[in-house]
Structures are given as C-alpha cells and as structure tokens.
Image (cartoon, helix red, strand yellow):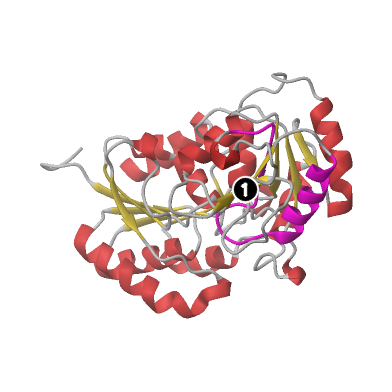
Amino acid sequence: MAGEGRRKLLAVSSGGGHWIEMRRILPAFDGFDLVLASTDPGPDADLGPVAYHVLPNVTRKNAADLPRLVAAVIGLVRRERPDLVVTTGAAPGLVALAAAKILAGSRTVWIDSIAAAEAMSLSGRLARPVADAWLTQWPHLARPGGPEHWGAVL
Amino acid sequence: MSGQENGAGRPDGGGAAGAAAIFVTVGSLFRFDRLIAAMDGWAAGSDLPVLAQIGTGGMRPSHMDWVERLDRAEFERAVAGSRLVVAHAGVGSVVTAARFGRPVVVLPRRRHLGEHTSDHQMETIGWLRDKPGIWVAEAEDRLADAIDSALAMPAGTLRTLPPVAPDAFIARLRHFLVG
C-alpha cells in the first residue's frame, strides 16, 4: 500500500439480504482500513471488533425518512473520508455513493443484488452516475457501457 | 431475543428460546402474515415443533412458538438447529439455509398484497426453483406439498454453501479496489 497508512474503505448496505451479500465479499477488503455501515442495530458478533455505524433504513414504504438517511450518511462520509466505497444496495448504499463522490472524491462500486435477476434494481439504476464500477450479478443483464458482470456472490 | 415479544404456541412448548424442527422466517424488513397464517394452520396439524420469526407487528401464531426478530447469531442457530426452513423468497434466508445445508421452502412476497415494494421475489423464485434443496410454493396452498417434499429429503444430504463468494469474483473486486 502506498503512503503511511492503509486506505480507508467504507462497506455500506441495507440489512437483511443485502448485508448477507456484503458479508460474502468481505475478503476483497483485506488490508484496507475497513468501516462498515448498515441498518441493523449492531455488527454481527462473529465479525469481532469492527468499526460499525448504524444507518436509518429507507425503502419505498418509508421514503419520507430519506432526509434522515441523507443526513446520517453525510455525517459518516465527512467523519471517515473514505478512499473507496462499496455497496450491495439498496437506498443507503445509493446515498453513500453519491455523498462519497461529492464530498470525498471516493472511488465507488455498486453491486446490484443477486435478487435483481431480470433488470437492474431501481436504486442500482439511480446509482449509475456515481458508481465507478457499476455491476450486475447476472451475465444476461450486462451491456456495453454498463452494467458490467464480474461475477456473483453465489 | 430479550426485550422483545415472543410466545410459545404450544402448551408443552419450550418457548422461543431453542431451535425447532421447522424454522419459519419472514426476514428482517417487513411482516408477512400470509406466510405466518398458512404455517400456523400447517403447524396445527403437525407434531413437529415449529419456531416462527414473525417480524415486527406481525400476526401472533397460536400453534407455533414465535419471536419477532433474531440477530445474526440467533438466526443462524435457528437455521442450523432445524430440519427445514420455510421462508419468504429473500436472499438472506435462502443463503443462510444453504450455508447450513438445510432444505428451504420459499413463498414469494407479492407487491399487490402489500407484502413488498416490488415483485422481485417472483423474479427470485424463477432462478431458485431449480436449485437442489430449494422448493418453491408460488402460493400458500402449495406450501404443504412443498414441505412434504422437502422433509422427505434425508437429513444431511445437501452440500453446504461456502461462506464467501467465489474466488474469481472476490479477486476481480479486489483488483479494482487495490488498483
């Protein structure tokens, strides 16, 4: 690694299935100064001591909570100033990519959920302008110019 | 599980503390009363102990032990200790069942019933249905047959899913991140 310290990587996702997908790619983050953010009240116990931040969850059912999510993400990005941000979705990840791009110039990765088997998810489509790597987990959804298919969590 | 509601559906039940032969889960986001009601009805006619994770604000079953939510460790214990998982068609539930080599029956949430914000679980069952150890019930009237089929599978015959993504995907991601 160049420089005096490890680069900082923020791994952010909604809870539930999105988080389980993120857990499956954690080995890709070895050697980075890792910060996790998700919507569950705390990190999984088996992760041991980790830097973990709780974010409000926002889905189409509670879109009115979006300002609260945006504020929380902006605070997180300002504090952590990540060099890289990786998300497996959904809305919290989208907001994190946008905030990191604008506030920290981070390098960003969007990985659309494996559940999105027939088309990119809505949040995935919205993430396109703020994702340096814009990925689908389904080969048949890859297109010239994006999204790309690099593999899948299963 | 402390600090939240749970219940024992059977007079001789051990409460919601331990694993049960059948573990029912609606996932961590929204309740799914159609699944819980159908499984409550199924449990009424079965001797097998059933534990249901019913979500916040979900209907209370009468014939199953239940808990509103489980943390990651509790959830994995419930799956690992079961013979069969019955779940919404969510990636987290299916992956966790596969991690422990447990058969899983899935019922997809439907958007038009207010069970999710889109019909992506219908997409999910399309690619899940051919996988070993996964049985799809498109609607609740198909659950009993799916459960019978899944229970007929001898215990321990399913391979367990590795805990992390395939090496090639991780390597490709890492190459981009380190680069």
Amino acid type, mark 1: Trp
The reply to whether residue A152 is visible in this rendering is no
Q: Is residue A63 left or right of residue B125?
A: left
* Helix, strand or loop under label 1: strand
Q: Is residue A80 left or right of residue A60?
A: left
Report the span colored magenta.
B19-45
**Residue B33 is one of the magenta-drawn residues:** yes
- Counting other residues with Cα less than 10 Å from the Cα at mark 1, is it few (<14), some (14-19), or many (20 or more)? many
The reply to whether residue A105 is visible in this rendering is yes
Which quarter shows the N terminus of chain A? top left
**Towards the viewer: B123 or B156:** B156
Q: Chain of mark 1?
A: B
Where residue A145 sits: x, y (%)?
55, 59
In the image, what residue occupies the spot 31% across and 64% down? Answer: A100
In the image, what residue occupies the spot 71% across and 35% down? Answer: B49
Where residue B4 sits: x, y (%)?
48, 54
The answer to whether residue A61 is above or below residue B170 is below
Which quarter shows the C terminus of chain A? top right
- Tell me how many marks there are: 1
**Towards the viewer: B13 or A28:** B13
Where residue A140 sits: x, y (%)?
69, 50
The residue wearing badge 1 is: B66
**Towards the viewer: B46 or A13:** B46
The answer to whether residue B158 is above or below residue B73 is above
